[in-house]
Amino acid sequence: MSIASTIACQPVLIAGRWRDANLVESFRATDPSHNQPIELDFPVSGWADVDEALRAATVAAAELRSLPAAKIAEFLEVYADLIQADAAELVETAHRETGLPKSPRLADVELPRTINQLKLAAAAAREGSWAMPVIDSAASIRSCYEPLGPVCVFGPNNFPFAFNSAAGGDFAAAIAAGNPVIAKANSSHPDTTRCFAVLALQAIERVGLPAATVQLIYRTGHQDGERMVADPRCGATGYTGSRSAGLALKAAADAAGKPIYLELSSVNPVVITTSALNQRGGQIVDEFVGSVLMGAGQFCTNPGLVLLVRSPAAETFINAVREKFAAQTPGTLLSPAVCRSLGRSVHVLADAGAEMLTGGGEALPDRCARPNAWMRAAADQFLADPEVFQTEAFGNASLVVVADDVDQLVGVIEALEGNLTGCVYSATDDPDYEPIAKALTPKVGRLLNDKMPTGVAVSPAMNHGGPYPATGHPGFTAVGIPAAIFRFAKLTCYDNVSEPRLPWLLRNANPTGGTWRQIDGRWTTDNVG
């Protein structure tokens, strides 16, 4: 008897219809708060599902190009309202699948942020300036950014709302650009993603968008995932997750010439000068401990590496953090896989010579959790093997590296890989700040001063990106409208095309009266002529 006839799985959403998957096998998510599987089966789809989704998305992409931007904006706004109305069920479902607190994390922080992102994307789509319309009237040449085509979104495990493949930042940016989305759910929270897709389809039907504007597949085999991102019908891919899986997808996409935007791994160094420790060491201890243990450390901007110069103040800081780590109950990790991965990473660091100041023991038996881990290494050790000492310990763990002097500390910074963030705590007129910041800035996408990196504000000025391996490309951000939209758009030039045949953004009359366009070298909201 085949597996398809013995297991009743949740349906996939393809071409506007919930239907049984082309089933290869099934899986269940885990309730990490009790370390028990959730009795809900989800399908691993075969290539036939992916092929049909790509085929339907191609049709939807062509239809979306003919619709006014206001229609796409309306979908995002209606979808945001439906999410708000269904907040209680979404929060309950995500809590069960991830163990993240209902309040404040899910209900009061992440869900409002998700709704806000969708509305910001709607505003950008409606107003149109994100597309950077440029008009050279004398040469009769005009250009703007336009939809790229079907976008595949792979969501991460740690943000079931804000980075969800069917509702999060990549999703919002891809839709705002005018593309349909094929959402690949994260296996840690498939039911949360299913709930979002149900609401997305309701919004599609209410507004009148193409049925395949949003589709959902829960999981595929590795080969089918790689085949999907490399398929000629795929416009681009947004991926947030592990480095190994992301690089496998990138290799496939690159070989086919397909854009793929990756968020992979980051240890987010925090550099604290001796003067800062002497001035307010106790305050920095509290800020650091709060940041690294918040949400059991499961943030892509979690401070996993601290750099200090040897001093009595540094020893006081290290000991104070050790005491607080040892005293605080470890948070619940997202899944058994995250728990296992954290344990492996801590052991890698310990085997390389890092001193285990606290933590490092076995996983807790009754839930997905490990003791808070605080480790120490000398700068000489780090510089002898910088790659292994930058192993990302995703979770409630951090490594402190102690240098003999500022010059050696700068040497450690220069040996760093690319990171999403880098932070410098310093005193006023601190002579050590300039050489540290000068070395750190090229290594990070976001430089912070006197502030832990954990929060990522939804701001048009935000860069949630960085040099490899933080991301696959240093020139793009996954957070911040309108910049995040450009990943899923193509620049199109119209040369000597008559005015009635041009896209609305490039015609003589300003399409909204408020869209910013560059006309003959000047940014303006005026009409041409």
Image: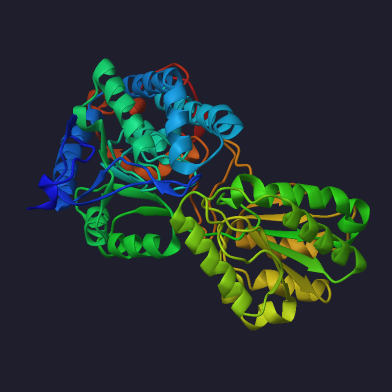
Q: Residue at x 46, y 23 (%)?
A: 88
Q: Residue at x 60, y 37 (%)?
A: 457
State the image coordinates of residue 106 (x, y, percent, origin top left). 53, 33
Front residue of this view, candidates 73 and 500: 73
Q: Quadrant of the C terminus?
A: top left
Most extreme residue toward the bottom is 384
Q: Is residue 321 above or below residue 381?
A: above
Residue 78 percent across, percent down from the top left: 37, 18
Q: In the image, residue 147 lies at what x, y percent?
A: 30, 37
Is residue 298 shown above or below 341?
above
Percent across and percent down for residue 238 are: 38, 48
Report the front residue among 428 and 242. Answer: 242
10 shown above or below 427: above
Extreme residue toward the left, this view:
1
Could you tell whether 519 is left or right of 201 in the image? right
Q: Is residue 3 left or right of residue 34?
A: left
User: Can I make out residue 517 in this image?
Assistant: no
* In the displayed structure image, the side of residue 107 where residue 94 appears, left or right: left
Query: For this rendering, which residue is in front, 344 or 235?
Result: 344
Q: Splitting the image into 4 quarters, where does residue 148 fall? A: top left
Residue placed most toward the observer, 515 or 43: 43
Q: Residue at x 87, y 54 (%)?
A: 281
Q: Is residue 171 visible?
A: yes
Q: Which residue sits furthest front?
A: 366
